Image (spheres, helix red, strand yellow):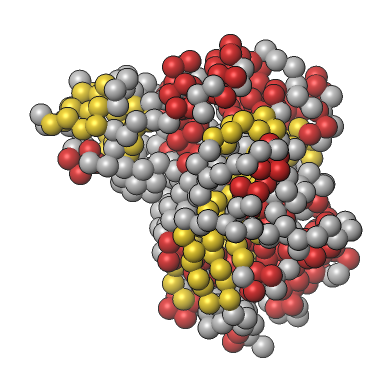
Amino acid sequence: MARVFRFGDGVSTDAIMPGRYNLTTDPAALARACFIENRPDFHETVRPGDVIVAGSNFGCGSSREHAPLSIRACGVSAVVARSFARIFYRNAVNLGLPVIRCADLYDAVRDGEQVEVDVASGTVVAGGRTFQGEPPSAVARRISEAGSLVELIRDHGWAAIEEVV
Amino acid sequence: MGTLVEEIFTRRLGRPVRAGDTVVAGVDAVMAHDVTGPLAIDAFRSLGMPLWDPARTVFSFDHVFPSNSVAASELHRRIREFAAEHGIRNLFAEGICHLVMVERGFVRPGGVVVGADSHSTTYGALGCFSTGMGSTDIGVTMATGRSWFRIPETLRIEVTGELRTGVQAKDVALTVIRRLGAEGANYLAVEWGGPAVSAMGMSERLTLANLSVDFGAKCGLCEVDATTWAYLGLPDQGTQRPHDPGYAEVLHVDVGDLEPQVSAPPAIENVRPLSELAGTPLDEVFIGSCANGRIEDMAVVAGMLEGRQVSPTTRTIIIPGTRTAYVQALERGYIDTFVRAGAVVMAAGCGPCLGRQHGTLGPGERALSTSMRNYPGRMGSPDAEIYLANPAVAAASALAGMIADPREER
């Protein structure tokens, strides 16, 4: 089971990782700064496997990859949002942080609730109901299968993407 | 045939490309700055591949330059070492990356440029497809010279009417954001067109392209015309316009009656007419950023501050966006005007926009900024308030110590 950390609409990368805290590339330091001002107890209370559930436009604003990197470094198993800002979504896929677009989960769960997430199928079971996320694009799936964009390109080159589009 | 973005990728790939296609394409240049650069370098090193092209790889020191901390200096050192190792000479510490990319000639009409900063959309003003990505994507492009793109559907914004005095491109963008919301163009290309955009100079078009990402767009493109070529100092090579385009949506905006707009906290889409917010007291005014830090913006502000004094209760910070703009402002006497007016002029760069150095806001403080982001915590404390407006409104507000209408000045 995973605990839900529920956030609202329009959570910016400034809220996830304020510009005063990302002068480092160290994942452990970034994890300590994750949501440091928006939700200061986040990094101390989140446990590996927990899940972030959010409203629309999650990760809007700055392209700083420190934001999804910090979430991953906290051990979050997935971010499930009604919608994602484009750059954040792509960054998360590139890093191997599971991101699931799901229209209905947000209104159905409370902060702190226990849910079950199956990243491979993009489903979340909450309160006895099963919520199905939107399937990722062929490219996103290919990157996820490889683990990260770096691993995909290093091992297979751009052909790996050209052959699925 | 197609939208601007379809035409750019069709020419690039030598085959018809349509919205919805996913392609792998070469780029003309790849950029990262002092905060996103080190992560891009890490991604690049993990690939174990040689650098694609040092002449087309750019690093800009602007988000925290000059360094304000040991940590920032460490980031700068890592970039310098990487550049030395790979023979990269495009290591610029002369202002905001997006403006430097244009000044240094990395942006050409019809080009494709990617950058590790969301406001990389700015180059769309010159008819160049450009978009912001994360450091991993940029590190991969540094190694391969390529990236993958899903060709976006296009939202055409057709702007008509003549802007009144004191009303600028910033107000056009903000009124569009008010209508569409902060994710109104998510995953879309935006085309800015119509007679009002054709009439704009390049500085104003750069503002439109810049703010496109702040309502979600992947890129914000303007048509290429004589203004574009003149700005680049190149011979006129003709127009680049969409041909028989199929748009996802066309938004008509008439700006003839538009008054200055102000985006109020806590989110950019919370846009109100200036008249509703006039009189709001301010602790800080920031004039600069990649949205409004060009010499044209400095000229507007200098015209209003000349021989006047900014409010003693408001700290006013002015930052010409690039060294070139700074030198022009010096030569034209603007810096003299700013300093004598009581403003603080700082080194070309991003400044207070992202709350990392210079004028960082404390809890309960209220700022008006010509930048483009007012998320809680963006410029400092999450309990500070950020209002966004055009440079004329900012200058009038600096004088008054409260949000003020530039049309009532003088």
Q: Quadrant of residue B398?
A: bottom right
Q: How many numbered badges does the structure rendering display? A: 0
Residue at image position (89%, 58%) is: B235
Where is B254 relative to A126, above or below? below
Residue at image position (67%, 12%) is: B48
Q: Is residue A102 left or right of residue B275?
A: left
Q: Position of residue B242 (x, y in %)?
A: 64, 58
Q: Is residue B276 left or right of residue B309?
A: left
Viewer-closest of A71 and B309: A71
| Image quadrant containing the C terminus of chain B | bottom right
Residue at image position (78%, 44%) is: B106
Q: Is residue B299 visible?
A: yes
Residue at image position (36%, 43%) is: A83
Q: Position of residue B129 (x, y in %)?
A: 66, 47
**Going by the picture, which residue comes out furthest to the left?**
A128
Q: Position of residue A39 (x, y in %)?
A: 34, 39
Where is B271 relative to A120, above or below? below
Q: Is residue B77 left or right of residue B210?
A: right
Q: Quadrant of residue B91?
A: top right
